[in-house]
Image (tube, helix red, strand yellow):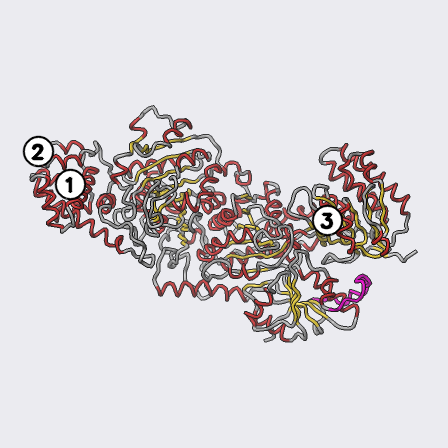
Amino acid sequence: MDYEGFLDSVRDDGGFRSREETKSIVANVFRAIAEVLPQKHLEGLSDQLPSELMVYLRGAHEEPDPYFDEHLFLGWVVSTIDATGERDKTTGGLDLYADYSGDEAMRRCRCVFKVLKSTVGADHRTSIGSFLPDGISALYQSA
Amino acid sequence: MTEKTVNDLSIMIGGDAGQGVESSGAGFCLALARTGLQLFALQDYRSQICGGHNFYEIRISDRPLYSHREPIHVLIALTPESVALHLDSIAPGGAVILPEKFEIDEAPLKERGISVDSLPLMKIAEEHGNRLMLNTAALAATAALTGFPLEYMEQVIRENFGKKSAELADTNVAVARAAHELAMERFGEDFPFRIEPPKKATKRMLMNGNEAIALGALAGGCRFVSAYPMTPGTSIIEFLSALPHEYGVVAKHAEDEIAAVCMALGASFTGARAMTPTSGGGFSLMVEAVGLAGMTEVPLVLVDAQRGGPSTGLPTRTEQSDLLFTIHASQGEFPRIVTAPTTIEECFEAGWRAFNLADKYQCPVIIMTDTFLASSLRTLEMDAIDFGRVVIDRGATVKSTDVDGESNGYLRFRFSDDGISPRALPGRGTATITAASDEHDETGHITEDSDNRVRMMNKRMQKLETARAEMKSPILYGPKDADLTLVCWGSTFGACREAVDEINAEGGSSANVLRIIDLWPMREEEVREALESCKRRVLVEQNYTAQLGKLIRMTTGIEMDDTLTKFDGRPFSPPEIKQRLGLEAGSGNEVGPKDLQRADQEYVVRRLR
Amino acid sequence: MDPRIYNAPTKNTWCAGCGDFAILRALKLALAEQVIAPHEVLVVSGIGCGSKLPDYMNVNGFMTIHGRPLPVATGAALANPELKVVVVNGDGDSYGIGGNHFLHTCRRNPNITHIVENNQVYGLTKGQYSPTSDKGYVTTTSPDGSMEMALNPLAVALAAGSTFVARGFAGDPKQMAQLIVAGMQHNGYALIDVLQPCVTFNRVNTYDWYRSRIYKLDEMDETYDPSSSEAAWEKAHEWEERIPTGILYNREGIPTYEDQVIQLRDNSPLKGTLSLWDDPRPEQYESLKEQFV
């Protein structure tokens, strides 16, 4: 699958507003994967993923941080949800954007994971899942 | 030759700030007190280090004094301005002592029979020492004028200057002797207002309210004090800072009052008895943290030594205008205790008692004084500061060993009937303690649950009712049934007390004083009952809006019949109160000490049940 | 020690993906590594999202008021120097409303480890610019872009005399835990400014924004000398293009404030009267009256 095809599949699946938004979601999920995927596992992936996506994985660490957890992973994705510029209309406690942003970020991850899993071969499909933090790994498996 | 008056006079030293008015006044006080005389000394100064008129007023007697009093009998004028400013305060037959070459208009003084004695004091100071010793020369001349033996002054001079150098002490003594000799030649024994050391020199202390609070706090186990300098509260932390290290009092001069109160709060949270003294402006900055202490139930002792407001106001002058502010300070509702000692003895008691109240009710306790009480000196009997009376009560506590292994079982904010949750300390057992400025549950963790909120508010506020039972009842001074009752709080009690003593001694109408020490929570029913039986209630307060009157009306519904307020920054004096009551009986000085004894009765108004 | 010992049963209310989670985790890891029992540590916070942190931990916790945790912690550390005192608060709390306390705590050097959750925005009040927001940053209170220079907390700390200055990144929890350990082992005040994206209200300074700029000082330059104030000063001024993380400055051997308080030395009365149950010694006091005679 080429880059445009990848984006189209994610956008169709998630019902995202624009190509730009989809691009940002895909980029951030991939950058988050780069945080946990040891560098040596990038080898072989380049045959299966378009170079536009491999760019996001370039930041992978030799030894990923062992304490990088699901909260951090989601952090990369939550920041793709548009929430700024609105005046505070709540009474101070519950913020509607913030309260649902976790669910929305997980949905976004799932959309990207689904297309990613269908793009890479069985070996990589399994190994990527094994490097993801616990909660995210479960999400990946179910995608 | 007029009749002599012995040991019933006031001496004033007036001069520019920087002329040593305060230090020489304090030295003279010490010399007088050591002979067994009783004193009341008032400082009056401006918020300037150098320049600006200053005065120090010393009232001398054989009997205990509770106030300063007009008129003055000797004015030591170190500047010509002093004469002009205090012209009207000088008693007929009094004297003005001033150095040579001052150009003043003597006519109005001479008209009133006041002698103006220009002495070559500067010349003496320069001959035997230097210009700075002018005040020493002037005091020695005053001793000669009034017949006070110079030896007591010499002893104090040697102590005070001997610390710096023996030579400095010698020259000061030389200056004093020369001035004394010269003045003796000039005055002989003609001056009608005399000072005679009593036959027996009773040992007494000279102390002000701040020092008494600091001593009380120390004895009450205060081991942490944090403050930002602010007149007139500063000398409390200065006193505690100067203590020998072995007393173990950690004193922290903080970057601002917010830090000061927060440091005390942090120290108290870990278990130290902690205090933060300040004045109204500093208290304004502390207000948010007072609410924090209320919410997190951390014991906290604050001192608001009030001064003239609003804002910078009259920085070195007295006022009682923070009462309603302290009672209501900080957002939201939480229990607090406000107590206002009326005498130096009560300042000592408030110093230790405040810590017991703070620990027992786990809330902020505010001691209120004012410039007048905080910084005026009075002679006190040695047993007036009675360390044996000090009680330490740390309230309901849980021993650390009892909560070991109960990390989740110990409830710092456990609901209880009296509102008090036994306190354990962080780091003193294996239980962990959480406190939050947010509403919290019994464990201290944050919750906005409605039921919990209601129960927790009830629990906290119940402490106010529990504490009320321990609050001091209003105290009546003077005859039980009187035509007139002066109602007061704080430092005005001293002047009220002397005023009613004089009124009662003069015959005609009778008067008493009702004072309220514990202002919040107040013994409302007792205050109501005490006031209801009064024939004429006159409120005496050092503020504009009659705040105690408002508080009494708010809590008891009782209105005052008359109100005497004063907000010029100068303390009430007994003659001023009498005059404003329309009871002035002449010049104000004819009430002799012997006539005053019968009014010396004091009893507590207890609720009859 | 198992870091789970510091877990509290409370419900966390941070936004999903919040960098505070990583700071909370790093603090637990750092405490576990030093084998500090929950009752031996006091975590003091102010007000803000990140200041809820003590609520999510089983330790002694004091959530105070906005801007004031440093003086509260100083009082606690002075009254009981045996407590390990950690302050956790945000950039608004530390550098805005609490700025004065920050300055004076740096030069005072109490034995406190200060972790600042610096997300360059006010989160709890929903997205206003903070003292560390970059100039031009658009928020609800800066619709035309912030017109103020961002505060440089590390340079300020150095100038104010802080003896330990470090920067962490919420995306690198392992390094952050190491920095917290180093800060707590440091005898004196230790500032650890943590770059922490606000995933809800800061769309500029995201994980990606930081990741593409930060580098670890010790990895980049093995010869970097954290005892050099000149080197630290230079590194503290790197921002925009490249942002260093790690220990910028660490000067040992400076006595803490507590070290200098004579009243706190061994067997001082403070230790005796600290507990709720010891009485002070009244017989000492009587002699004090003599100074008034």
Report which quarter residue B353 is drawn in: bottom right
Q: Which mark is on residue B55?
A: 3
Cα distance between the residues tagged 1 and 2: 20 Å
Of residues C280 and B274, the one drawn nearer to the viewer in this rendering: B274
Cα distance between the residues tagged 3 and 1: 85 Å
Report in which chain the residue with disc 3 lies.
B
| Residue drawn at point x = 81 percent, y = 44 percent | B103
Give residue C135's position: percent from left, percent from top: 35, 40
Asked which secondary structure carries label 3, the reply is strand
Comes first in the chain, label 1 or label 2: 2
Q: Which residue is mark 2?
A: A47
- Closer to the camera: disc 3 or disc 2? 3
Say if labels 3 and 1 share a chain: no
Q: Type of residue at label 1? A: Ser
Horizontal side of residue B385 vs A117, given as left or right: right
| Residue drawn at point x = 11 percent, y = 50 percent | A13
- Closer to the camera: disc 3 or disc 1? 3
Asked which secondary structure carries label 2, the reply is helix
Asked which secondary structure carries label 1, the reply is helix
Give residue C60's position: percent from left, percent from top: 40, 49
Horizontal side of residue B501 vs B118, given as left or right: left
Q: Type of residue at label 3? A: Phe
User: Within 10 angstroms of label 2, few (less than 14), some, or many (20 or more) residues?
Assistant: few
Magenta segment: B582-603
User: Within 10 angstroms of label 1, few (less than 14), some, or many (20 or more) residues?
Assistant: some
Q: Which mark is on residue A130?
A: 1
| Residue drawn at point x = 65 percent, y = 42 percent | B49
Residue B518 is one of the magenta-drawn residues: no
Q: Type of residue at label 2? A: Asp
CB under 8 Å between callouts 3 and 1? Answer: no
